[in-house]
Image: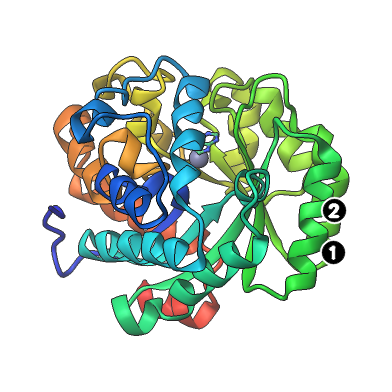
Amino acid sequence: MANDVAATTTPLAELHMHVEGSLEPELIFELAQRNRVTLPYRDLDDLRSRYEFTDLQSFLDLYFANMSVLRTAADFADLTRAYFARAAAGGVRHAEIFFNPQAHTARGVPLGEVLDGLGDAVAASEAEFSLSSGLIVGILRDRPVPEADAMLTDLLASGAPVIGIGLDSAEVGNPPSLFADVFARARAAGLHAVAHAGEEGPPDYIRQALDLLGVERIDHGIRCLEDEDLVDRLVRDRVPLTVCPLSNVRLRVVDRLADHPIRAMLARGLAVTVNSDDPAYFGGYVDDNLAQLRDAVGLTDAERETLARNSIEASFASAARKAELL
Ligand code: HPA
Ligand code: ZN
């Protein structure tokens, strides 16, 4: 169920959501049946009992395992449409969604199936859900750099409607610096650039993402709070941070939602936005994140409004679309 969103408030843009992380348990079973994939779970309850994570890697293990049910363009289109329907019901009017091609090509699913399915849903999102959308290709930073490079070559050759490049998966030990050349090529081809940094990794990874990858937004970025000079820079340059509160709790980046520093980040002048990251795994969509923040940390209506405005301003939507939404 979507949470109530007052009609008068600024709508939301969701800027940090991995579409494979919106794969709900029911759809996992449905797609397994459709594609004759044998799942290692007895039933839905058995699957749900595994959604207990100790860190990022423990989540990633399940996230990648469950992708085995995604095989055809129709699967990717159904997954993306299910996300759009739920996001729209929660007040999202613009969504920039991550996807991980390497996680699919590595298990034999052709890149074309992935791009056809996602592209189909994205092309229809305004007409079907009154929601503008775009795709951001996510590099898996724990896989070899030449693989990311080859993926980018294939992606650019495909002519797929991708608006940006990002960097995700296991952060610690896989610094942004490794991917400087891949990002330079993507930016030269006209793609926007973002990167996960400062989720489990140190503040220095945020600096690397800015200085070596040329990113326009930082995904997560919560560990910037350990480095006052870095915070000054992020505030001064209005670098958006796509923060994901429920994810932070479920992956033990933050102990409890009541301890989440989102209000302090806003008060400090950081351009923060709230996002769901992997909503099927972390207990909620973007409206759930906002509703739970209200209860756990006392997020005010004015702060919620600032978060919404930040999300539209930080998006890669056209100036005309932003003006429509603000
Ligand atoms: N961090 C890194 N990689 C990811 C995440 C995340 O929160 N979600 C999906 N891939
Ligand atoms: Zn993420």
Above or below: residue 297 compared with residue 313: above
Q: Position of residue 150 (x, y in %)?
A: 83, 52
Residue bearing mark 1: 188
Residue that badge 2 annotates: 184
Q: How many marks?
A: 2
Is residue 258 something one can see in this rendering?
A: yes
State whether label 2 is within 8 Å of ligand 1: no
Query: Where in the figure is residue 76, as x and y percent of width and height?
Result: 46, 61
Q: Residue at x 35, y 33 (%)?
A: 245
Q: Is residue 10 something that shows in the picture?
A: no
Is 293 rendered above or below residue 181? above
**Is residue 311 placed above or below 205 in the rendered structure?**
below
Q: What element does badge 1 sit on?
A: helix
Task: Judge left or right: residue 186 versus residue 10.
Answer: right
Q: Position of residue 210 (x, y in %)?
A: 73, 41
Question: Which quadrant holds residue 206?
Answer: top right
Q: CA distance from mark 2 to mark 1?
A: 6 Å
Position of the C terminus by quadrant: bottom left
Whether the residues at callouts 2 and 1 have beta carbons within 8 Å, the answer is yes
Residue drawn at (82%, 33%) of the image: 177
Amino acid marked by disc 2: Ala
